[in-house]
Image (tube, coloured by chain):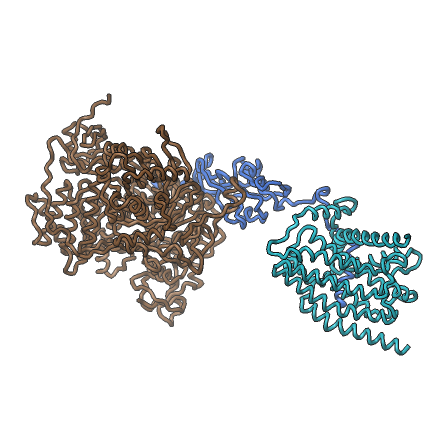
């Protein structure tokens, strides 16, 4: 009983507390760079698409709102199409964590309301940005073993030149 | 002729005041809750958001007025009307000031008030029944049990006041408090009456008939549009009514220094309305069995004790 | 059964197994790489280390490789031993030092044995900071992709390719950390089982190139159990689907049939299902003669109008359509109007084959039983072309002698390297009598090249040698006599002799000769077997329905009749002008098919039927095994199963689902009584649930169709099927015929199969899928009076041309697959060098050859081993007209084209 009265009193005192509400949109809140908002696909420092179409974002997505199709050009993998259904997205960021190439990134932008659900279907053209996003220096193909134009076998980081199978040297 | 005109004006005035007050309360409650929860509440529509009421009104009027095909249509429509009518009728006996008030001098004022509040239980039970939905029915049954139980000691709590005054007329009761508000000699009665009043209007923490987390929305699950609005408004009129009754019975009604009587009445009533909202902001909902036990095992003995002590004191004098 | 103790608990094991096999069979997760149930152990990867204790008192023990240690009675081992655990983790860490960071761009990712094993051992963080060795990749043809950086040097690929499948062009080069698995130089992998490298390789060195072209991870593909439609062996497959397209075919283990391996035609021949030119909508011929696509209702209206005229209706079935479709047609047109859609010669051969298998005394073995044969005679059939998986089984049978030697030396059969060292390539006798060189010759004890009738004569001579009561063969050349004697002696000495023949040459005498030998061998303590290869996936089922041939249909057609052709291209079955005559005579030609063929182009009404991946259906393999395949693709247009179209045409409504058809087929034709047992019925449920056909991680449900509609259309679910078409439903231990894909917790790769077998490498739990429709009853010995045909006499200025159905291109559907099409050789006529000289043509030169049915201009291949006067023509290739083979052809020197 007493505790109830105390509760009433403390609650009443909140009348004189400062309000926590931010008066959006007049007053824009600070959103950290790691804020989980609209999803983008970034490019590597050379300006090529970072996405290698590995499907890990799609499988990590708890609401299954990411779908894509792999295609290949000169040994380089990239998505033929890449679709995010933002009307289903819960902005959990699992896709970003799953992405092995830093391609998919969540950005501090959440102002994407629409009147038609169709307008929330983002295709690759809508998702792809021209910059590197949060990770300016990383390029997957400089690390991985697949040969692509401009980087042959054995030319990635920490790789020795390809073996000559006919060499007799030990 | 003048008397009749004055009477009519009184009626229309009070009716308007009540309905507008109830409507405003929907906004005031949300803003107060906001403040108590370190938020702002609705502050966008009109000055300080006060036109939120209008916006909500328009919205609720334009909602689809849906009667579920499985419901009993006649009773379904009747139920929300009953709650509003009962609450409004009870106000007939409230003496706002010596001059304002429809039948403040009615010599069975308290009985009339009790009778009208009892009527509102029908509304809730009928709504629950007519909805033909198990959650609504459960809500209705809870409401019936709760209101019937709390009505018992609501009445008993008032006996002390009546004994002191020697009259059932509310105006007489107010006048009897010229020297001392009845809250002092009848403190126990005040507490019991207030708690019963909260239960009677099924406001938090006694809103088990609506218990969202277990019953959807209780008895008004199936209601929409203005029919739902009537339950809503009925509830707020109930709050005003119970607050007004507390003021009249225990806090000297319109009486007070300097300010005109009408203002005193409004200030006092408003304070209690605010207290009701504070309760909602601060207290959790008890379990249903706790509610019933609280009523029968604590409140009822307390109210009986109050009568006994009051009687004993009066006899010794 | 031996009792072994694993971590102080008792388990039973087969004492012939090794410990790794025993541990896996008992449900333990023990990592391994180089061991494979079909390939045995070599102890190359050192991954399956366990601690073995000498006796209960021994607490020290020693680390051993489970795959190299026999599961003898009383063995005590510990898998959980801390030292063994850290040993395995270290081995993985070493293996991983050179493994690239490729997983995101690796086709194996998500179903990678190396990933599974890495996770299983707990190695999670790479400490190796130095540079990695790299390799250059090779072009290996249209089927297999090569990425050598990923290699962990387990040697499985060469052990399979060279030792198991007999390939020669994949080998290991360089040494130690640098070992390289590939060809001497870039080029197409020649062996027809190269596709199995994809499944055999524990990581992503060899991957499926056709899948890579339209790639999806394993978890993203719907899968359904299916049966290969590219030959008559009836290998079990899993069809993987995504986006309405067949993405790949995987081997589906069936202990009795295909085991762990598929041929490349079966694995990569699915491309026909995805062709843009395939039939997807009904097509009607306007009165003007032009074709236009129509709706389903329009088509059915047109059909009602057509059939309402009441003329004669002729139905032509198909050996590549399911039993149910053929039966639906037979019911629609009546037994008299129904004709099996095969050539007359093929129909005769098939009838003979059925007579031999059904009324004979010698059973036809399963592929697993074939592998146990100790002497094999291949009589006149090039099984490497017509039934490739049988050829692979015969290769294993030839290793029987090695195993005998191993037994003598008390070496366990799974000690692969030891067995090979001890046996030094010793083989059981395998005799090949054929017209031309076959791809089994390399393991044959003796080969013999002769014309078909001479092959039959050799067979009859062998029979006479075995059973003196059988008629002898007159005028047999000395060499043949000697060979017949040698083969007969070998067969008589065998315990499980196996005679292999088939319909490939189109010569009944060869079949009868083979049957005669098998019959003569029966008795004593021998268990002979006879294998007769049939050309197509449901040839046997269709032949059991006894419907004559296409030629019968052509003969019986009357002016104004209606012809219904079921999934068949008649131009591949009979002479062009005769088929044209049939279509000209017919007032209406209704064709049900899923691929665009010349027959479809002649139709008045074309109905889009479902292919093997789009409907459920039953096929009967050459062994007489009825097997059900299930729907994996749910087409969005008017495509439906042929039996449904035929039901809709007939206007009958008592068939709602496949089970209704199966039931009425079983009751209408006694030979099919058992087909309902091939698989549980359509209302089969486990704990009230259907079996899910999509893995539980299936992704993109709410986005994949969002470009068309955001409303997430409801998944189409077949009315009665044991499978749900979504990721909802049961997945666990299900009946063997209903396993949509192999997966088990911690086992994402195909090796999860271990969890579905009774004993690793044995039958699937609950018995291998399929039901045999017949067993030999011995009621009528197959023509004991059959006598040898006359000797081959070459015609004046004529060659006897025999057909060859090449593995790539010889089968209609797979030839339409882009990957297989790349491997199809141009049609050519193989000639004896002397014959070539007589016409003055060289290898690659052109000649004209005239048949009764028409003439061809063909390139010449000189084949020294061909008998003189016999030519061999590859048939069935796209763009080639049918001609009556075997038959006489008159060659001419090619005149310059006018």
Image coordinates for residue A75, horizontal then vertical, percent: 44, 38
Q: Quadrant of residue C510?
A: top left
Asked whether, in this view, residue A12 is left or right of residue C93, the answer is right
- Residue at the image position 26 percent from the left and 37 percent from the top: C572
Asked whether, in this view, residue C114 is left or right of residue B51, the answer is left
Residue at far right of view: B258
- Residue at the image position 77 percent from the left and 70 percent from the top: B153
Q: Quadrant of residue B134?
A: bottom right
Image coordinates for residue C526, horizontal then vertical, percent: 17, 58
B4 and B184: which is toward the camera: B4
Chain letter for blue? A
Q: Quadrant of residue B208?
A: bottom right
Q: Is residue C819 above or below residue C460?
A: above
Work out which quarter of the rendered image holds the C terminus of chain C and state it: top left
Chain letter for cyan? B
Chain letter for brown? C
B126 and C569: which is toward the camera: B126
Image coordinates for residue C412, horizontal then vertical, percent: 27, 60
Q: Is residue C338 visible?
A: yes
């Amino acid at each position: 009983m007493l505790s109830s009265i105390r509760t009433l009193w403390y609650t009443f005192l909140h009348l004189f507390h400062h309000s926590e509400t931010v008066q959006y949109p007049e007053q824009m809140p600070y959103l950290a760079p790691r804020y989980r908002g609209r999803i983008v696909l970034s490019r590597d420092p050379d300006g090529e698409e970072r996405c290698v179409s590995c499907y890990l974002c799609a499988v990590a997505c708890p609401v299954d709102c990411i779908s894509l199709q792999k295609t290949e050009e000169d040994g380089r993998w990239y998505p033929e199409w890449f679709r995010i259904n933002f009307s289903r997205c819960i902005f959990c960021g699992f896709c970003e964590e799953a992405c092995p190439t830093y391609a998919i990134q969540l950005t501090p932008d959440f102002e994407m309301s629409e009147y038609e659900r169709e307008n929330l279907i983002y295709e690759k053209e809508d998702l792809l940005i021209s910059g590197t996003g949060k990770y300016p220096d990383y390029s997957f193909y400089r690390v991985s073993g697949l040969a692509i134009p401009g980087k042959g076998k054995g030319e990635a980081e920490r790789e020795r030149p390809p073996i000559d199978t006919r060499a007799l040297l030990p | 002729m003048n008397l009749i005109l004055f009477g009519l004006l009184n009626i229309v005035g009070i009716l308007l005041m009540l309905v507008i007050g109830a409507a405003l309360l929907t906004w005031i409650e949300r803003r107060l809750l906001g403040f108590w929860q370190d938020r702002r509440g609705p502050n966008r529509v009109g000055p300080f958001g006060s036109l939120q009421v209008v916006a909500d009104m328009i919205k609720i009027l334009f909602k689809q007025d849906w009667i579920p095909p499985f419901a009993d249509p006649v009773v379904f429509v009747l139920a929300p009307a009953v709650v509003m009518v009962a609450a409004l009728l009870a106000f007939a006996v409230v003496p706002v000031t010596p001059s304002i008030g429809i039948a403040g001098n009615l010599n069975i004022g308290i009985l009339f008030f009790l009778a009208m509040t009892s009527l509102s239980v029908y509304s809730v039970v009928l709504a629950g029944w007519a909805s033909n939905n198990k959650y609504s029915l459960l809500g209705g049954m809870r409401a019936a049990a709760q209101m019937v139980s709390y009505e018992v000691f609501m009445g008993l709590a008032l006996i002390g006041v009546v004994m002191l005054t020697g009259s059932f007329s509310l105006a007489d009761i107010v006048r009897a408090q010229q020297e001392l508000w009845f809250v002092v000699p009848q403190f126990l009665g005040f507490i019991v009456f207030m708690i019963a009043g909260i239960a009677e209007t099924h406001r938090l923490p006694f809103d088990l008939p609506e218990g969202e987390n277990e019953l959807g929305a209780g008895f008004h699950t199936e209601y929409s549009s203005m029919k739902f609005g009537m339950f809503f408004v009925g509830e707020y009129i109930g709050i005003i009514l119970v607050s007004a009754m507390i003021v009249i019975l225990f806090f000297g009604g319109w009486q007070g220094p300097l300010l005109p009587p009408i203002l005193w009445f409004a200030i006092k009533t408003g304070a209690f309305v605010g207290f009701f909202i504070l309760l909602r902001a601060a207290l959790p909902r008890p379990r249903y069995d706790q509610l019933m036990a609280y009523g029968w095992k604590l409140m009822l003995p307390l109210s009986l004790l109050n009568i006994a002590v009051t009687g004993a004191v009066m006899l010794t004098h | 059964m031996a009792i072994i103790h694993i971590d102080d608990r008792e388990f039973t094991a087969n004492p012939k197994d090794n410990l790794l096999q025993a541990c896996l069979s008992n449900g333990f997760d023990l990592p391994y790489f180089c061991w494979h149930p079909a390939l045995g152990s070599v102890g190359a990867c050192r991954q399956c280390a366990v601690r073995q204790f000498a006796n209960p008192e021994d607490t020290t023990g020693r680390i051993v490789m489970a795959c190299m240690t026999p599961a003898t009675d009383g063995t005590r081992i510990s898998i959980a031993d801390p030292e063994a655990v850290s040993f395995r983790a270290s081995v993985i860490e070493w293996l991983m030092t050179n493994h690239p960071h490729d997983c995101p761009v690796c086709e194996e990712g998500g179903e990678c044995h190396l990933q599974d094993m890495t996770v299983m051992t707990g190695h999670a963080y790479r400490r190796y900071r130095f540079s990695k060795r790299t390799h250059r990749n090779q072009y290996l043809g249209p089927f297999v992709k090569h990425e050598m950086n990923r290699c962990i040097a387990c040697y499985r690929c060469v052990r399979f390719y060279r030792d198991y499948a007999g390939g020669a062009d994949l080998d290991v080069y360089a040494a130690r950390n640098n070992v390289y698995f590939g060809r001497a130089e870039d080029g197409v992998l020649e062996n027809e089982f190269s596709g199995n490298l994809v499944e055999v390789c524990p990581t992503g060195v060899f991957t499926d190139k056709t899948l890579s072209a339209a790639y999806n991870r394993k978890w993203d593909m719907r899968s359904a159990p299916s049966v290969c439609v590219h030959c008559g062996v009836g290998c079990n497959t899993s069809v993987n689907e995504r986006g309405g397209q067949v993405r790949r075919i995987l081997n589906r283990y069936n202990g009795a049939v295909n085991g762990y391996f598929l041929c490349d035609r079966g694995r990569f021949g699915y491309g026909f299902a995805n062709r843009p030119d395939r039939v997807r909508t009904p097509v009607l011929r306007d009165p003007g003669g032009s074709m236009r696509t129509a709706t389903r209702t329009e088509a059915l209206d047109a059909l009602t109008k057509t059939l309402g005229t009441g003329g004669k209706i002729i139905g032509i079935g198909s050996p590549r359509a399911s039993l149910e479709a053929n039966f639906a047609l037979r019911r629609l047109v009546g037994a008299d109007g129904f004709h099996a859609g095969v050539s007359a010669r093929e129909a005769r051969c098939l009838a003979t084959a059925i007579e031999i298998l059904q009324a004979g005394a010698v059973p036809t073995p399963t592929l697993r039983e074939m592998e146990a044969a100790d002497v094999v005679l291949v009589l006149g059939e090039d099984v490497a072309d017509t039934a490739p998986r049988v050829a692979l089984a015969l290769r294993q049978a030839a290793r029987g002698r090695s195993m005998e030697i191993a037994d003598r030396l008390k070496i366990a059969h799974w000690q692969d390297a030891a067995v090979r060292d001890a046996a030094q390539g010793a083989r059981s006798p395998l005799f090949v009598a054929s017209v031309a060189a076959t791809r089994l010759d390399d393991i044959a004890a003796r080969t013999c090249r002769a014309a078909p009738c001479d092959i039959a004569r050799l067979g009859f001579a062998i029979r006479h040698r075995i059973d003196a009561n059988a008629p002898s063969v007159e005028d047999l050349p000395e060499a043949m006599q000697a060979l017949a004697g040698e083969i007969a002696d070998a067969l008589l000495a065998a315990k499980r002799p196996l005679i292999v023949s088939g319909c490939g040459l189109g010569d009944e005498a060869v079949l009868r000769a083979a049957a005669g030998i098998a019959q003569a061998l029966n008795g004593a303590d021998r268990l002979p077997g006879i294998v007769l290869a049939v050309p197509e996936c449901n040839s046997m089922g269709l032949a059991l329905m006894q419907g004559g041939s296409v030629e019968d249909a052509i003969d019986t057609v009357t002016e104004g009749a209606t012809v219904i052709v079921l999934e068949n291209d008649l131009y591949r079955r009979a002479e062009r002008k005769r088929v044209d005559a049939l279509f000209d005579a017919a007032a209406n030609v209704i064709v049900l098919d899923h691929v665009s063929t010349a027959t479809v182009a002649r139709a008045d009404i074309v109905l889009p039927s479902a292919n093997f991946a789009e409907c459920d259906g039953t096929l009967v393999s050459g062994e007489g095994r009825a097997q059900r395949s299930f729907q994996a693709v749910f087409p969005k247009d008017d495509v439906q199963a042929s039996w449904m179209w035929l039901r809709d045409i007939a206007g009958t409504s008592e068939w709602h689902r496949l089970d209704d058809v199966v039931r009425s087929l079983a009751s209408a034709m006694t030979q099919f009584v058992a087909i309902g047992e091939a698989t549980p019925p359509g209302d089969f449920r486990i704990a009230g649930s259907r079996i899910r056909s999509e893995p539980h991680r299936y992704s993109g449900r709410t986005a994949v169709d969002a470009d068309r509609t955001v409303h997430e259309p409801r998944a189409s679910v077949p009315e009665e099927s044991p499978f749900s078409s979504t990721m909802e439903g049961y997945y666990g231990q299900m009946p063997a015929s209903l396993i949509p894909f192999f997966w088990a917790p911690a086992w994402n790769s195909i090796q999860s199969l271990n969890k579905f077998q009774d004993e690793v490498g044995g039958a699937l739990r609950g018995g291998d899928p399929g039901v045999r429709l017949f067993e030999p009853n011995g009621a009528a010995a197959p023509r004991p009076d059959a006598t040898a045909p006359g000797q081959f006499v070459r015609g004046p200025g004529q060659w006897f041309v025999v057909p060859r159905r090449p593995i790539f291109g010889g089968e209609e559907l797979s030839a339409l697959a882009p990957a297989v099409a790349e491997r199809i050789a141009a049609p050519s006529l193989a000639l004896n060098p002397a014959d070539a000289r007589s016409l003055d043509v060289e290898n690659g030169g052109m000649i004209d050859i005239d048949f009764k049915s028409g003439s061809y201009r063909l390139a010449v291949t000189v084949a020294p081993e061909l008998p003189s006067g016999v030519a061999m023509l590859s048939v069935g290739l796209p763009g080639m007209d049918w001609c009556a083979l075997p038959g006489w052809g008159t060659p001419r020197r090619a005149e310059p084209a006018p």
